[in-house]
Image (spheres, rainbow, N blue to C red):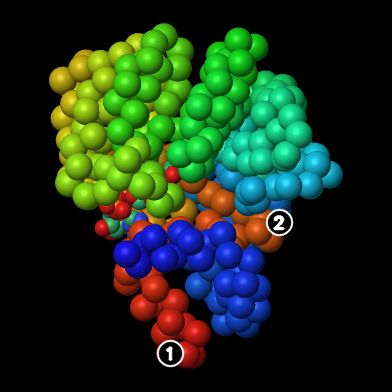
Amino acid sequence: MLRSALVTASRSPRCRSLVEGLPLARPVVGRFVAGHDVNAALRVTRTLARDRLVTLDRLGEDTTDRARAGSAVAAYRTLLATLAREGLAGRAEVSVKLSALGRALPADGDRIALDNAREICAAAAVAGTTVTVDMEDYASVDATLSIVAELRADFPWAGVVLQSYLRRTEADCADLAGPGSRVRLCKGAYDEPASVAYRRPAEVDASYVQCLKALLAGQGYPMVATHDPRLLAIAEALAARAGRSAGDHEYQMLHGVRTDEQRRLAARGPRVRVYVPYGAEWYPYFMRRLGERPANLVFFARALRGR
Ligand code: FDA
């Protein structure tokens, strides 16, 4: 219930201006968000890249203004050129949300988002790195998968996120387990109804395991995105059973979450990638992170009270 409330609040303009205006919110936000600009993102990337890989997300979503979608593309182009110049493109890729690229625009949103995503993929190809398309709410899944299919015609390495809480995802994993496909599997962070999503954690986890089996037995490059110790252990066992080696799949976690585990896992040999968001539009991302763990909310409330 708490999670649903926070996901709802993440889309409320009133809650947004309230939380963004709290002077003490920033230090807590800083646990999950690298900073407001590309320089802050690069500082964090340089440190992480010593023992882990990185995927950088320039924050922003649900854009309903074409010029803002264009600014997001420009920001990604700058980021990618900088990663190449700094010699970081071999260790860092980018993650993008299609709703930041115009998918939610009333007229022709899907085509605009596709064209914008194409531009970012072309810049990534020049930089020598890859792009993964985040998955947003259920209503956007079909459009996201068809846009990624179009991107893959020109950029076969373009990756996509699938969410195990959706009842459809096991079938989507089977469809996307073919040669060259890059799929990041996560549990899912939005609030979806029982008609399309599993609501009980045990069901979400059981679906995650079925999806993992399909992806790890397939011919693609699975990206196991979870902090859940039980699922991580199962993923490692399934990867070994499928004859996978360290270079043909990876584990992914969020910046600021289970950092010790990220380091421990990377030190044992598997590839570990950290999802690093940056930018001024941290509010919806931050609210989803609060919703994932009730203790985060307590921590946030204490910080606001100055304790
Ligand atoms: P779970 O929520 O059960 O957490 C397991 C344990 O991890 C917790 O007990 C706690 O210790 C720790 N933990 C998890 N979240 C935490 C938090 N916020 N703060 C502190 N501790 C926390 N979702 C989506 O819908 N679309 C997407 O595109 C993506 N992309 C994405 C990329 C990557 C790299 C990751 C790791 C995750 C996503 N997600 C996502 C988010 C994902 O769907 C999910 O909400 C979170 O990863 C939390 O789920 P876990 O699998 O970690 O399990």
**Residue 97 or 259: which is nearer the viewer?**
97
Q: Position of residue 107 (x, y in %)?
A: 76, 34
Q: In the figure, residue 231 lies in which quadrant?
A: top left
Residue at 46% x, 39% y is: 138
Q: Residues within 10 Å of mark 2 (few under 14, many from 20)?
A: some
Badge 2 amino acid: Asp
Judged from the image, the secondary structure of the residue bearing numbered disc 1 is loop
- Quadrant for the C terminus, please: bottom left
**How many numbered circles are shown?**
2
Q: Give the amino acid type for the residue marked by disc 1 in the picture.
A: Arg
- Residue 287 vertical position relative to residue 114 in the rendered view, above or below: below
Depth order, front residue of 190/257: 190
Q: Where residue 197 sits in the image (x, y, percent)?
A: 32, 41
Label located before the other in sequence (2 or 1): 2
Q: CA distance from mark 2 to mark 1?
A: 28 Å
Residue that appears at 29% across and 26% down: 170
- Residue 239 percent coordinates (x, y): 23, 24
Does residue 225 sit above or below 108 in this rendering? below
Quick check: 162 above or below 245? below
Of the numbered discs in the image, which one, if any, rests on residue 37?
2
Label 2 with label 1: CB-CB less than 8 Å = no
Q: Is residue 236 left or right of residue 282?
A: left
Q: Residue beneath label 1, please?
A: 307
* Side of 306 where 216 appears, left or right: left
Q: Secondary structure at mark 2?
A: loop
Viewer can see residue 41:
no
- Disc assigned to residue 3: none
